[in-house]
Image: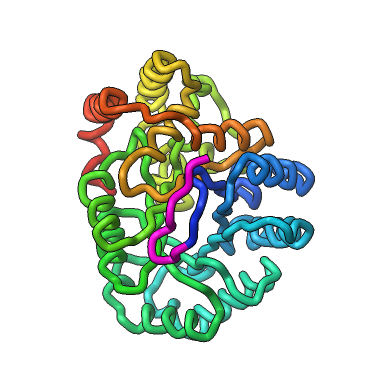
Amino acid sequence: MKTSTLGRTGATVSSISLGTWQLGADWGDVSEEDARAVLDAAVESGVTMLDTADVYGDGRSEQLIGRYLADRRDLDVLVATKMGRRLPQEVENYSAENLRAWNDRSRKNLGVDTLDLTQLHCPPTALYSVDRVFDDLDAMVAEGRMRAYGVSVETVEEALAAIARPNVATVQIIINAFRLKPLDAVLPAAIDANVGIIARVPLASGLLSGRYTSETTFAENDHRNYNRQGDAFDVGETFSGVDYEKGVAAAQEFSALAAEYDLAPATAALAWLTQVPGVSTVIPGARSPEQARMNAAAGGVEPLGAEFHARVVDLYDRSFRAAIHDRW
């Protein structure tokens, strides 16, 4: 497993981390036993960072991680959580009182005094220009409530605004073979500012696994069913905002490309992303130990090279650029 420095946190993390949204909610039901098996498989495969949020299962994901790490005190694992989605997305709700209340709740859920990394969870765009919020976050670091903070964003413009903030340590943003816009300006800016980039939705909600067809169905409580039109949250979080049928067709092309390199599609998609300059770590989710191990293996794939990258860009240009490049 390759590693990198996670921006201004100074922490060394695995190039493949584990996203744990699915351990809390919105991807179908996952038992605690199954969740622990996924966590075991990930850390035993070299994963050293877990990404969660206070709203994943209303805290269930944090609590599962907290109990798991309490039983595995030998592990050196960084936990990145998020806050800010427990109230309507209005700037005034990001008060010092609410920030501390959310922080208290996450520390209790995770069973720690100090959070490793806290990210604002896709806050409203207007928040990035409000100095008070970032002053409050600085004060919380000084108080020992958290070691560092970052921002999870929806758009390139929000990412650039976050990177310009002097104490933002990390930016989490959607990047995958079907969402390439962050490569244009966000990644170069992050490199220049020493801000860590956490790439989320790296498999386009599973499309890049190559397993889905136009007939594939998803559980009623799976966001790939109920949020296809953005009814619950930003549609860009579900299949990266691409049309599902076009996504299935493009995934078939990507699978053929991966096969030329003797790689499974998901492995190729993750490996390519870890090798994009400026990406610190990639956070695929996993519903099973097998998925967790396969995801982690991508962190050890040899460089895919310029031709592979060029063909990813060509596929994006032909399939998605016109429809989504300017949206996020």
Residue drawn where x is 75% and y is 62% of the image: 70
244 relative to 70 in the view: left or right: left
* Number of callouts: 0
168 relative to 73 in the view: left or right: left
Residue 235 locus on image (x, y percent): 40, 46
322 relative to 298 in the view: left or right: left
User: In the figure, 125 relative to 286: above or below?
Assistant: below
Residue drawn where x is 27% and y is 63% of the image: 193
User: In the figure, 155 relative to 119: above or below?
Assistant: above
Q: Quadrant of residue 296?
A: top right
Residue drawn where x is 38% and y is 47% of the image: 174
Is-magenta flag for residue 213?
Answer: no
Residue 116 locus on image (x, y percent): 55, 67
Q: Quadrant of residue 321?
A: top left
Residue 234 locus on image (x, y percent): 40, 51
Q: Which residues are magenta?
A: 1-10
Q: Is residue 319 visible?
A: no
Q: Nearer the viewer, residue 134 or 44?
A: 44
Q: Is residue 66 visible?
A: yes
Q: Check the image and tell me how it is coloured.
A: rainbow
Q: Nearer the viewer, residue 322 or 271?
A: 271
Residue drawn where x is 61% and y is 43% of the image: 221
Q: Nearer the viewer, residue 219 or 41?
A: 41
Residue 288 locus on image (x, y percent): 67, 35
